[in-house]
Amino acid sequence: MSLESPTRTTAAGRVAEFAAALDPGDVPDEVLERARHLVLDAVGLAFASTAYPFAGVARDALATFGTGAHPVLGMPDRLAPRDAAVLGGVLVHGMDFDDTHIPAVTHVSAAALPAAISAATVAGASTRDLLAAYVLGVEVSARVGIGGAGGFHDVGFHPTAVAGAFGAAVAAGKLTGLDATGLAAAQGVVGSMAAGLLEFLEDGSWTKRLHPGWAAMSGLTAAAFARAGWTGPAAVYEGRFGLYATHLAGRETHPEAVTEGLGERWELLRTAVKPYPICHFNHAFADAALLLRSEHGVRAQDVRAIRCAIHPVPGKVVCQPPENKWAPRDEYDAKFSLPYTVAAALVRGRFTLAELSDDALADREILALARRVEVVDDHEGLFPAAYSGRVEIELADGRVVAHREQVNRGHEERPLTNAEIVAKYTDTIGRVADAATAERVRDAVLSLGDDRPAAEFAEACRDQR
Protein backbone atom coordinates (compact mmCIF):
# COMPACT_ATOMS: atom_id res chain seq x y z
CA MET A 1 0.00 0.00 0.00
CA SER A 2 1.33 3.41 -0.93
CA LEU A 3 1.53 6.10 1.70
CA GLU A 4 1.72 8.91 -0.89
CA SER A 5 -1.36 11.13 -0.78
CA PRO A 6 -1.73 14.91 -0.79
CA THR A 7 -4.66 14.62 1.61
CA ARG A 8 -2.55 13.17 4.39
CA THR A 9 -1.20 16.32 5.96
CA THR A 10 -0.77 15.06 9.53
CA ALA A 11 0.85 12.03 11.10
CA ALA A 12 -2.45 10.89 12.60
CA GLY A 13 -4.08 11.15 9.17
CA ARG A 14 -1.39 9.06 7.54
CA VAL A 15 -1.61 6.43 10.27
CA ALA A 16 -5.39 6.43 9.91
CA GLU A 17 -5.37 5.90 6.15
CA PHE A 18 -2.84 3.10 6.48
CA ALA A 19 -4.84 1.41 9.23
CA ALA A 20 -8.16 1.78 7.42
CA ALA A 21 -6.77 0.20 4.26
CA LEU A 22 -4.89 -2.62 6.00
CA ASP A 23 -6.19 -6.11 5.30
CA PRO A 24 -4.95 -8.99 7.47
CA GLY A 25 -3.50 -10.49 4.29
CA ASP A 26 -1.22 -7.46 3.95
CA VAL A 27 0.71 -8.43 7.08
CA PRO A 28 3.69 -10.68 6.29
CA ASP A 29 3.54 -14.23 7.62
CA GLU A 30 6.76 -13.66 9.59
CA VAL A 31 5.13 -10.79 11.45
CA LEU A 32 1.96 -12.76 12.17
CA GLU A 33 3.91 -15.73 13.49
CA ARG A 34 6.00 -13.58 15.81
CA ALA A 35 2.84 -11.75 16.86
CA ARG A 36 1.27 -15.04 17.98
CA HIS A 37 4.28 -15.73 20.17
CA LEU A 38 4.23 -12.25 21.69
CA VAL A 39 0.57 -12.83 22.50
CA LEU A 40 1.45 -16.20 24.02
CA ASP A 41 4.04 -14.57 26.26
CA ALA A 42 1.53 -11.91 27.34
CA VAL A 43 -1.28 -14.36 28.09
CA GLY A 44 1.01 -16.63 30.11
CA LEU A 45 2.06 -13.65 32.20
CA ALA A 46 -1.55 -12.62 32.73
CA PHE A 47 -2.26 -16.03 34.23
CA ALA A 48 0.85 -15.95 36.41
CA SER A 49 0.01 -12.49 37.73
CA THR A 50 -3.19 -13.79 39.29
CA ALA A 51 -1.10 -15.26 42.11
CA TYR A 52 -0.02 -11.79 43.27
CA PRO A 53 -1.95 -9.49 45.62
CA PHE A 54 -2.21 -6.67 43.07
CA ALA A 55 -4.41 -8.87 40.86
CA GLY A 56 -7.06 -9.28 43.55
CA VAL A 57 -6.98 -5.60 44.43
CA ALA A 58 -7.47 -4.62 40.78
CA ARG A 59 -10.33 -7.10 40.41
CA ASP A 60 -12.04 -5.78 43.55
CA ALA A 61 -11.67 -2.18 42.38
CA LEU A 62 -13.21 -2.91 38.99
CA ALA A 63 -15.97 -5.04 40.51
CA THR A 64 -17.39 -1.86 42.09
CA PHE A 65 -18.53 -0.89 38.58
CA GLY A 66 -20.48 -4.14 38.20
CA THR A 67 -19.98 -7.31 36.22
CA GLY A 68 -20.45 -8.06 32.54
CA ALA A 69 -20.15 -10.80 29.96
CA HIS A 70 -16.60 -10.28 28.71
CA PRO A 71 -14.00 -12.88 29.81
CA VAL A 72 -10.93 -11.68 31.72
CA LEU A 73 -7.48 -12.97 30.77
CA GLY A 74 -6.31 -15.59 33.24
CA MET A 75 -9.25 -15.17 35.63
CA PRO A 76 -12.71 -16.74 35.94
CA ASP A 77 -14.30 -13.29 36.18
CA ARG A 78 -16.46 -11.58 33.58
CA LEU A 79 -16.63 -7.81 33.31
CA ALA A 80 -17.78 -5.10 30.95
CA PRO A 81 -15.43 -4.96 27.92
CA ARG A 82 -13.61 -1.80 29.00
CA ASP A 83 -13.12 -3.07 32.55
CA ALA A 84 -11.90 -6.43 31.23
CA ALA A 85 -9.32 -4.55 29.15
CA VAL A 86 -8.16 -2.59 32.19
CA LEU A 87 -7.73 -5.76 34.23
CA GLY A 88 -6.08 -7.53 31.30
CA GLY A 89 -3.53 -4.74 30.98
CA VAL A 90 -2.80 -4.89 34.71
CA LEU A 91 -2.28 -8.65 34.56
CA VAL A 92 -0.06 -8.66 31.45
CA HIS A 93 2.19 -5.92 32.83
CA GLY A 94 1.85 -6.46 36.57
CA MET A 95 4.94 -8.63 36.98
CA ASP A 96 6.98 -6.36 34.67
CA PHE A 97 7.99 -9.47 32.76
CA ASP A 98 6.22 -8.51 29.51
CA ASP A 99 7.69 -7.56 26.15
CA THR A 100 9.39 -4.24 25.41
CA HIS A 101 10.04 -2.43 22.16
CA ILE A 102 13.61 -1.32 22.87
CA PRO A 103 13.96 1.94 20.86
CA ALA A 104 10.47 3.00 21.96
CA VAL A 105 11.18 2.04 25.59
CA THR A 106 7.57 0.83 25.58
CA HIS A 107 5.78 -2.34 26.67
CA VAL A 108 3.79 -2.68 23.47
CA SER A 109 1.58 -5.73 24.03
CA ALA A 110 0.24 -4.80 27.46
CA ALA A 111 -2.21 -2.19 26.14
CA ALA A 112 -2.63 -3.26 22.51
CA LEU A 113 -3.66 -6.85 23.27
CA PRO A 114 -6.38 -6.24 25.92
CA ALA A 115 -7.84 -3.41 23.84
CA ALA A 116 -7.90 -5.57 20.72
CA ILE A 117 -9.49 -8.53 22.50
CA SER A 118 -12.28 -6.42 23.97
CA ALA A 119 -12.94 -4.52 20.74
CA ALA A 120 -12.90 -7.70 18.64
CA THR A 121 -15.29 -9.51 20.97
CA VAL A 122 -17.77 -6.63 21.03
CA ALA A 123 -17.59 -6.26 17.25
CA GLY A 124 -18.09 -9.97 16.61
CA ALA A 125 -14.80 -10.06 14.72
CA SER A 126 -12.72 -13.11 13.85
CA THR A 127 -9.35 -13.96 15.32
CA ARG A 128 -7.91 -13.04 11.91
CA ASP A 129 -9.14 -9.49 12.42
CA LEU A 130 -8.08 -9.54 16.06
CA LEU A 131 -4.51 -10.54 15.23
CA ALA A 132 -4.15 -7.88 12.53
CA ALA A 133 -5.54 -5.18 14.84
CA TYR A 134 -3.15 -6.24 17.61
CA VAL A 135 -0.27 -5.90 15.14
CA LEU A 136 -1.53 -2.40 14.27
CA GLY A 137 -1.65 -1.50 17.95
CA VAL A 138 1.92 -2.64 18.44
CA GLU A 139 3.10 -0.77 15.34
CA VAL A 140 1.53 2.53 16.41
CA SER A 141 2.61 2.23 20.04
CA ALA A 142 6.18 1.50 19.02
CA ARG A 143 6.38 4.38 16.56
CA VAL A 144 4.91 6.90 18.99
CA GLY A 145 7.47 5.76 21.56
CA ILE A 146 10.33 5.99 19.04
CA GLY A 147 9.27 9.56 18.29
CA GLY A 148 10.09 10.45 21.89
CA ALA A 149 13.78 9.65 21.26
CA GLY A 150 14.15 8.04 24.69
CA GLY A 151 13.04 11.21 26.45
CA PHE A 152 9.76 10.23 28.10
CA HIS A 153 11.45 8.53 31.06
CA ASP A 154 13.78 11.47 31.52
CA VAL A 155 10.89 13.84 32.23
CA GLY A 156 8.91 11.37 34.33
CA PHE A 157 6.41 9.93 31.85
CA HIS A 158 5.97 6.19 31.33
CA PRO A 159 5.92 5.70 27.53
CA THR A 160 3.90 2.50 27.87
CA ALA A 161 1.03 4.60 29.17
CA VAL A 162 1.55 7.44 26.71
CA ALA A 163 2.34 5.58 23.49
CA GLY A 164 0.15 2.62 24.41
CA ALA A 165 -2.98 4.76 24.42
CA PHE A 166 -2.48 5.66 20.75
CA GLY A 167 -1.85 2.06 19.73
CA ALA A 168 -4.93 0.90 21.63
CA ALA A 169 -7.07 3.57 19.97
CA VAL A 170 -6.02 2.51 16.48
CA ALA A 171 -6.45 -1.21 17.24
CA ALA A 172 -9.90 -0.65 18.74
CA GLY A 173 -10.93 1.75 16.00
CA LYS A 174 -9.94 -0.68 13.29
CA LEU A 175 -11.99 -3.46 14.85
CA THR A 176 -15.05 -1.29 15.35
CA GLY A 177 -15.06 -0.38 11.67
CA LEU A 178 -13.83 3.22 11.75
CA ASP A 179 -12.82 4.70 8.42
CA ALA A 180 -9.73 6.88 8.00
CA THR A 181 -11.52 9.97 9.26
CA GLY A 182 -12.69 8.12 12.35
CA LEU A 183 -9.30 6.59 13.04
CA ALA A 184 -7.67 10.01 12.83
CA ALA A 185 -10.26 11.38 15.25
CA ALA A 186 -9.66 8.49 17.67
CA GLN A 187 -5.97 9.35 17.83
CA GLY A 188 -6.79 13.00 18.37
CA VAL A 189 -9.18 12.16 21.19
CA VAL A 190 -6.89 9.70 22.95
CA GLY A 191 -4.09 12.26 22.97
CA SER A 192 -5.89 13.96 25.84
CA MET A 193 -5.82 10.70 27.80
CA ALA A 194 -2.18 9.76 27.17
CA ALA A 195 -0.36 10.01 30.49
CA GLY A 196 1.35 7.95 33.15
CA LEU A 197 3.72 9.26 35.83
CA LEU A 198 6.88 7.56 37.08
CA GLU A 199 6.50 8.90 40.60
CA PHE A 200 5.87 5.34 41.79
CA LEU A 201 9.66 4.96 41.74
CA GLU A 202 9.87 7.14 44.84
CA ASP A 203 7.79 4.97 47.13
CA GLY A 204 7.21 1.62 45.41
CA SER A 205 3.50 2.24 44.79
CA TRP A 206 1.52 0.27 42.23
CA THR A 207 0.51 2.89 39.66
CA LYS A 208 2.80 1.62 36.89
CA ARG A 209 0.91 -1.67 36.88
CA LEU A 210 -2.25 0.21 35.98
CA HIS A 211 -0.76 2.21 33.12
CA PRO A 212 -1.31 -0.22 30.21
CA GLY A 213 -4.80 -1.10 31.42
CA TRP A 214 -5.66 2.59 31.53
CA ALA A 215 -4.15 3.03 28.05
CA ALA A 216 -6.27 0.15 26.74
CA MET A 217 -9.42 1.64 28.27
CA SER A 218 -8.53 5.06 26.86
CA GLY A 219 -8.11 3.59 23.40
CA LEU A 220 -11.47 1.84 23.56
CA THR A 221 -13.12 5.02 24.84
CA ALA A 222 -11.55 7.23 22.19
CA ALA A 223 -12.59 4.84 19.41
CA ALA A 224 -16.18 4.82 20.71
CA PHE A 225 -16.31 8.62 20.80
CA ALA A 226 -14.88 8.83 17.29
CA ARG A 227 -17.44 6.31 16.07
CA ALA A 228 -20.19 8.49 17.51
CA GLY A 229 -18.87 11.51 15.62
CA TRP A 230 -16.61 13.16 18.19
CA THR A 231 -13.69 15.07 16.72
CA GLY A 232 -10.09 15.29 17.88
CA PRO A 233 -7.19 17.57 16.97
CA ALA A 234 -5.67 16.59 13.63
CA ALA A 235 -2.07 17.37 14.59
CA VAL A 236 -2.18 15.45 17.86
CA TYR A 237 1.44 14.34 17.47
CA GLU A 238 3.29 17.22 15.84
CA GLY A 239 1.06 20.21 16.64
CA ARG A 240 1.88 23.28 18.71
CA PHE A 241 0.21 21.67 21.71
CA GLY A 242 0.49 18.10 20.47
CA LEU A 243 2.02 15.11 22.22
CA TYR A 244 5.69 15.87 21.67
CA ALA A 245 5.48 19.62 22.26
CA THR A 246 3.69 19.17 25.58
CA HIS A 247 5.22 16.01 27.00
CA LEU A 248 8.77 16.64 25.77
CA ALA A 249 8.95 20.42 25.44
CA GLY A 250 12.37 21.66 24.34
CA ARG A 251 13.78 18.16 23.85
CA GLU A 252 14.80 16.25 20.78
CA THR A 253 11.84 14.46 19.27
CA HIS A 254 11.12 12.72 15.98
CA PRO A 255 7.41 13.03 15.11
CA GLU A 256 8.19 11.71 11.65
CA ALA A 257 8.90 8.33 13.25
CA VAL A 258 5.17 7.81 13.76
CA THR A 259 4.69 7.13 10.05
CA GLU A 260 8.18 6.46 8.73
CA GLY A 261 8.35 3.04 7.06
CA LEU A 262 4.76 2.20 8.02
CA GLY A 263 3.79 -1.00 6.26
CA GLU A 264 7.35 -1.56 5.03
CA ARG A 265 9.30 -1.93 8.28
CA TRP A 266 7.42 -3.88 10.94
CA GLU A 267 8.36 -2.69 14.42
CA LEU A 268 6.74 -5.74 15.97
CA LEU A 269 9.75 -7.76 14.82
CA ARG A 270 11.99 -5.50 16.92
CA THR A 271 10.04 -6.20 20.10
CA ALA A 272 12.07 -7.87 22.84
CA VAL A 273 10.76 -10.65 25.06
CA LYS A 274 12.22 -10.52 28.56
CA PRO A 275 14.41 -13.34 29.85
CA TYR A 276 14.30 -11.87 33.40
CA PRO A 277 11.30 -10.72 35.51
CA ILE A 278 12.81 -7.27 36.13
CA CYS A 279 12.95 -3.86 34.48
CA HIS A 280 14.49 -4.22 31.05
CA PHE A 281 17.13 -1.63 31.96
CA ASN A 282 18.62 -4.18 34.38
CA HIS A 283 18.88 -7.16 32.03
CA ALA A 284 22.38 -6.46 30.72
CA PHE A 285 23.61 -6.17 34.30
CA ALA A 286 22.06 -9.48 35.33
CA ASP A 287 23.72 -11.23 32.39
CA ALA A 288 27.06 -9.52 33.04
CA ALA A 289 27.03 -10.41 36.74
CA LEU A 290 26.13 -14.04 36.06
CA LEU A 291 28.84 -14.34 33.42
CA LEU A 292 31.48 -12.91 35.78
CA ARG A 293 30.34 -15.27 38.53
CA SER A 294 30.58 -18.25 36.21
CA GLU A 295 33.78 -17.43 34.35
CA HIS A 296 35.82 -16.01 37.24
CA GLY A 297 34.36 -17.85 40.20
CA VAL A 298 33.17 -14.60 41.79
CA ARG A 299 31.46 -15.11 45.14
CA ALA A 300 29.84 -12.48 47.32
CA GLN A 301 32.29 -12.91 50.20
CA ASP A 302 35.20 -12.17 47.86
CA VAL A 303 33.82 -8.88 46.51
CA ARG A 304 35.38 -5.63 47.65
CA ALA A 305 33.51 -3.27 45.32
CA ILE A 306 31.23 -3.29 42.27
CA ARG A 307 30.97 -0.54 39.66
CA CYS A 308 28.10 -0.50 37.21
CA ALA A 309 28.02 1.82 34.19
CA ILE A 310 24.59 2.82 32.88
CA HIS A 311 23.23 5.62 30.71
CA PRO A 312 21.88 8.47 32.89
CA VAL A 313 18.29 8.24 31.60
CA PRO A 314 17.63 4.60 32.56
CA GLY A 315 19.90 5.24 35.55
CA LYS A 316 17.26 7.58 36.96
CA VAL A 317 14.79 4.70 36.92
CA VAL A 318 16.87 1.86 38.38
CA CYS A 319 19.55 3.63 40.43
CA GLN A 320 17.88 6.60 42.11
CA PRO A 321 17.36 7.34 44.93
CA PRO A 322 20.19 5.06 46.13
CA GLU A 323 18.61 4.32 49.52
CA ASN A 324 15.57 2.79 47.84
CA LYS A 325 17.69 0.72 45.48
CA TRP A 326 20.03 -0.73 48.11
CA ALA A 327 17.14 -2.13 50.16
CA PRO A 328 13.98 -2.60 48.06
CA ARG A 329 10.77 -2.40 50.07
CA ASP A 330 8.94 -5.07 48.10
CA GLU A 331 9.26 -7.28 45.02
CA TYR A 332 8.11 -4.54 42.66
CA ASP A 333 10.65 -2.12 44.10
CA ALA A 334 13.32 -4.78 43.56
CA LYS A 335 12.48 -5.06 39.85
CA PHE A 336 13.64 -1.46 39.45
CA SER A 337 16.86 -1.76 41.44
CA LEU A 338 20.11 -2.25 39.57
CA PRO A 339 22.14 -2.80 42.79
CA TYR A 340 19.72 -5.46 43.99
CA THR A 341 19.70 -7.19 40.59
CA VAL A 342 23.49 -7.46 40.49
CA ALA A 343 23.79 -8.50 44.11
CA ALA A 344 21.10 -11.16 43.92
CA ALA A 345 22.57 -12.59 40.70
CA LEU A 346 26.02 -12.82 42.27
CA VAL A 347 24.79 -14.36 45.53
CA ARG A 348 22.35 -16.86 44.06
CA GLY A 349 23.80 -17.53 40.63
CA ARG A 350 20.51 -16.79 38.89
CA PHE A 351 17.70 -14.24 38.69
CA THR A 352 14.24 -15.75 38.61
CA LEU A 353 10.91 -14.99 40.26
CA ALA A 354 12.35 -16.65 43.37
CA GLU A 355 14.84 -13.78 43.70
CA LEU A 356 11.85 -11.47 44.15
CA SER A 357 10.36 -13.47 47.02
CA ASP A 358 10.22 -12.17 50.58
CA ASP A 359 13.08 -14.36 51.73
CA ALA A 360 15.33 -13.02 48.96
CA LEU A 361 14.40 -9.43 49.75
CA ALA A 362 15.40 -10.07 53.37
CA ASP A 363 18.62 -11.92 52.50
CA ARG A 364 21.34 -10.09 54.44
CA GLU A 365 24.07 -11.26 52.08
CA ILE A 366 22.25 -9.81 49.06
CA LEU A 367 21.46 -6.54 50.83
CA ALA A 368 25.03 -6.12 52.08
CA LEU A 369 26.41 -6.72 48.59
CA ALA A 370 23.93 -4.28 47.04
CA ARG A 371 25.42 -1.51 49.17
CA ARG A 372 28.81 -2.15 47.56
CA VAL A 373 27.43 -1.26 44.13
CA GLU A 374 28.62 2.10 42.82
CA VAL A 375 26.83 3.50 39.78
CA VAL A 376 28.62 5.60 37.16
CA ASP A 377 27.48 7.16 33.89
CA ASP A 378 28.02 5.04 30.80
CA HIS A 379 29.31 7.08 27.87
CA GLU A 380 29.78 4.08 25.58
CA GLY A 381 26.30 2.54 25.70
CA LEU A 382 23.67 2.49 22.99
CA PHE A 383 20.58 3.76 24.84
CA PRO A 384 17.83 3.99 23.62
CA ALA A 385 18.75 1.74 20.69
CA ALA A 386 19.76 -0.94 23.20
CA TYR A 387 19.97 -1.20 26.98
CA SER A 388 23.71 -1.52 27.51
CA GLY A 389 25.45 -2.24 30.79
CA ARG A 390 28.93 -2.79 32.20
CA VAL A 391 29.81 -4.49 35.48
CA GLU A 392 33.27 -4.24 37.02
CA ILE A 393 34.08 -6.18 40.19
CA GLU A 394 37.08 -5.59 42.45
CA LEU A 395 37.95 -8.72 44.40
CA ALA A 396 39.66 -9.12 47.77
CA ASP A 397 42.68 -10.79 46.15
CA GLY A 398 43.34 -7.67 44.06
CA ARG A 399 41.87 -8.91 40.81
CA VAL A 400 39.52 -6.70 38.82
CA VAL A 401 37.15 -8.45 36.42
CA ALA A 402 34.71 -6.73 34.11
CA HIS A 403 32.18 -7.48 31.39
CA ARG A 404 30.09 -5.31 29.11
CA GLU A 405 26.78 -6.34 27.56
CA GLN A 406 26.47 -3.75 24.80
CA VAL A 407 23.26 -5.22 23.41
CA ASN A 408 20.89 -6.74 25.94
CA ARG A 409 19.61 -10.27 25.42
CA GLY A 410 16.12 -10.26 23.91
CA HIS A 411 16.99 -7.27 21.71
CA GLU A 412 16.27 -7.61 17.98
CA GLU A 413 19.96 -8.41 17.46
CA ARG A 414 19.81 -11.12 20.17
CA PRO A 415 16.16 -12.19 20.16
CA LEU A 416 14.62 -15.02 22.10
CA THR A 417 13.49 -17.67 19.67
CA ASN A 418 9.87 -18.68 19.35
CA ALA A 419 10.76 -21.94 21.05
CA GLU A 420 12.27 -20.03 23.97
CA ILE A 421 9.11 -17.95 24.23
CA VAL A 422 7.02 -21.12 24.39
CA ALA A 423 9.31 -22.41 27.15
CA LYS A 424 8.89 -19.16 29.09
CA TYR A 425 5.12 -19.35 28.63
CA THR A 426 5.07 -22.93 29.89
CA ASP A 427 6.93 -21.88 33.02
CA THR A 428 4.89 -18.77 33.77
CA ILE A 429 1.42 -20.22 33.23
CA GLY A 430 2.50 -23.44 34.94
CA ARG A 431 2.84 -21.54 38.22
CA VAL A 432 -0.93 -21.19 38.50
CA ALA A 433 -2.57 -23.48 35.93
CA ASP A 434 -2.63 -27.20 35.22
CA ALA A 435 -1.22 -28.78 32.08
CA ALA A 436 -4.62 -29.06 30.39
CA THR A 437 -5.25 -25.34 30.81
CA ALA A 438 -1.77 -24.46 29.57
CA GLU A 439 -2.27 -26.63 26.48
CA ARG A 440 -5.73 -25.20 25.75
CA VAL A 441 -4.50 -21.62 25.96
CA ARG A 442 -1.36 -22.33 23.93
CA ASP A 443 -3.33 -23.95 21.15
CA ALA A 444 -5.82 -21.06 21.07
CA VAL A 445 -3.08 -18.46 20.86
CA LEU A 446 -0.91 -20.20 18.29
CA SER A 447 -3.90 -20.68 16.00
CA LEU A 448 -4.77 -16.97 16.07
CA GLY A 449 -5.51 -15.73 12.59
CA ASP A 450 -8.17 -18.20 11.51
CA ASP A 451 -11.84 -17.40 11.05
CA ARG A 452 -12.98 -18.46 14.51
CA PRO A 453 -14.86 -15.81 16.46
CA ALA A 454 -12.64 -13.65 18.66
CA ALA A 455 -15.12 -14.33 21.46
CA GLU A 456 -14.07 -18.00 21.42
CA PHE A 457 -10.46 -16.98 21.78
CA ALA A 458 -11.26 -14.70 24.71
CA GLU A 459 -13.16 -17.55 26.36
CA ALA A 460 -10.25 -19.94 25.84
CA CYS A 461 -7.89 -17.50 27.58
CA ARG A 462 -9.84 -17.19 30.81
CA ASP A 463 -9.53 -19.44 33.86
CA GLN A 464 -12.30 -21.97 33.29
CA ARG A 465 -11.80 -23.97 36.45
Image (cartoon, rainbow, N blue to C red):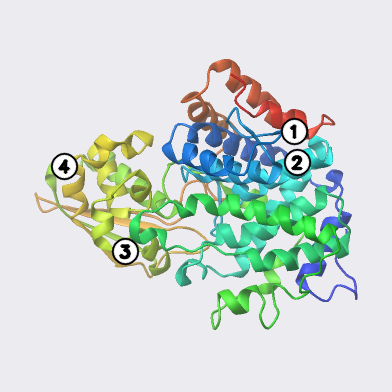
Which numbered circle lies on residue 448?
A: 1
Q: Residue at x 37, y 57 (%)?
A: 389
Q: Residue at x 61, y 79 (%)?
A: 245
Residue 312 placed where, x, y %? Answer: 38, 69
Say if mark 2 contacts mark 3, CB within 8 Å.
no
**Gap in angstroms between the C-alphas marked 4 and 2:** 47 Å
Q: For numbered disc 4, what is the local secondary structure?
A: helix
Residue 164 placed where, x, y %? Answer: 63, 57
Q: Residue at x 79, y 35 (%)?
A: 127
**Gap in angstroms between the C-alphas marked 1 and 4:** 47 Å
Is any atom of residue 80 visible in this view? Answer: yes
Q: To which residue does mark 4 refer?
A: 364
Horizontal side of 318 relative to 393 (left or right) equals right
Q: Is residue 174 above or below residue 47?
A: below
Q: For numbered disc 3, what is the local secondary structure?
A: loop
Q: To which residue does mark 3 refer?
A: 320
Q: Residue at x 21, y 44 (%)?
A: 366
Residue 427 placed where, x, y %? Answer: 48, 27
In the rendered view of the protein, which quadrant contains the N terminus?
A: bottom right
In the rendered view of the protein, which quadrant contains the C terminus?
A: top right
Label located before the other in sequence (3 or 4): 3
Q: To which residue does mark 2 refer?
A: 131
